[in-house]
Image (cartoon, grey):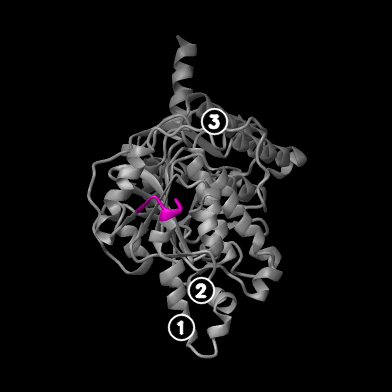
Amino acid sequence: MMNCENGFTRLEKETALLGNSDAYKRLQLLFDNGTFTELDKFSKNGENGCGVVTAYGSVNGAACYAFSQDVTVCSGAMGRAQSAKIKKVYDLALMNGAPVIGIFDSNGAFANEGVDALNAYGELIAAAGKISGVVPQISVIAGKCIGSAAILAAVADLTVMVEGAEFCVNSAAITGNESVGSAETAMKNGTVSVVAENDEAAFNKVAELVAMLPMNNLTVPFTADYIPAAVAGEGVYKDIANIVDAESFLELSKDFGKCAKVGFALVAGNAVGVVATDADKNDAYLCANGAAKIARFVRLCDAFSIPVVTLLNSAGFMGKADDELDGSVRAVAALTGAYAEATTAKVTVIVGKAYGAAYTAMAGKGAGADYVIALADAAVCALNPTTAVQFLYKDRLGEEKREDLEKEYILTEGSPFKAAENGAINDIVTEDAVANAVIAALDMLASKRVSTIEKKHSNMPY
């Protein structure tokens, strides 16, 4: 009886010490109704806790695993004990086919363990790589996330960062630049997908993202009630709103590669990935960052069989000397490779210009587009009209205005009807009918199955 009483007393004592830290509070914000099942609650690193809380619960109705670093316990330092605890989360997520959400807030590695602490990070990075493309991974940068921790967080499919947090490999203290590691900088350089003003807003955004993603690579994406598209906004946002269900577009990496917009949305209640080029930026040319953003997003959608709807309005890729000298072809090749490799359903809508390499990369047969729709006033040209006039109408340039010759080229050679005659476009519609055309195309492709050549993996351009 005495042993039982001691056992109960110890349980009450140790339980009383748990549940008051920011790590617990963040998990309560993350999981539905603030409830979750804690895993390995009494694991310790010597006399101290492991500096991390691990848990299982539901997020927006979907089963998820999560870990939340506890900066109040040994500064949340990563060591063997913390690594083992987080590694179990990855293992359980893999076995049960459920997403992993990692909440980062730590001052670094456990100094007393030396190289072993660094190896602990290495093991977790390997574990995260193992489940990449199998179950979704979302990182939340809630505090400090520096060095090896930043690498682990960046391995995730999507990253949400709280304003005031720090996310970098080398901190401002080392680089001497106060902008290093800030949320604003991380958003501009494409390191994070979303920035939130506080913890609560961050976890609300995580819930939205989880709702758009399937549980794993073998389950179907999210579905919801169909709310017909409602035209709103201007420019590229109007193009998107004209196709997706009302107010369903969830944009990612907004401040990185602004000439391209990517994000999740619903079309007839079904989750899709949306890629749209912004003709109002860079004179309708796609820059290297925009191409890189699209490539990354298309690969994410393909990993979880989320259909990709591309809204194309582009004069091509940036062609200035500095862009070529900087090797912009790398980003262009990565974009083209991402589309070509993707076996998920791919529907492209040409809403404006589709010139040269832009058409090839995102709408052509080389990109593996399953269905291409064009608006009746779109322009599909093998060459940029400026270049075409220089070569094809050179003898008329002295007598006629370049602008008139470019219009003639677009009307004669760039008509979507001519492209449709050659099988390059599957359907031509009005702006009012484009949403129904996309819905019909996605419905037709809903059962798409493609077997690829057995190989280890592709070697994507860097």
Read off the magenta span.
421-427
Residue 313, quarter of the rendered image: bottom left
Cα distance in 3D space between marks 3 and 1 = 47 Å
Amino acid at circle 1: Glu
Residue at 38% over, 43% down: 212
Residue 426 is a magenta residue: yes
- Looking at the image, residue 47 sits to the left or right of residue 445; the answer is right
Q: Of marks 3 and 1, which one's residue comes earlier in the chain?
A: 1
- Mark 1, secondary structure of its residue: helix
The structure residue drawn at horizontal position 55% and vertical position 52%, both measured from the top left corner, is 295
Q: Is residue 138 visible?
A: no
Indicate the amino acid at tag 3: Ser
Say which element carries label 2: helix
Q: Position of residue 283 (x, y in %)?
A: 49, 75
Distance of label 1 from label 2 (alpha carbons): 9 Å
State the predominant SS element of the stretch in magenta. loop
The numbered mark at residue 385 is 2
Q: Quadrant of the N terminus?
A: top left
Considering every residue shown, the one lying at the far right of the view is 115
Element at badge 3? loop
Q: At which x and y percent is residue 198? A: 41, 56
The mark nearer the N terminus, 3 or 2, is 2
At label 2, the amino acid type is Pro
Q: Residues within 10 Å of mark 3 (few under 14, many from 20)?
A: few
The alpha-carbon separation of the residues under discs 3 and 2 comes to 39 Å
Where 398 sits versus 197, above or below?
A: below
Which residue was labeled with disc 3?
Answer: 451
Look at mark 1 in the image and give the residue it sits on: 403
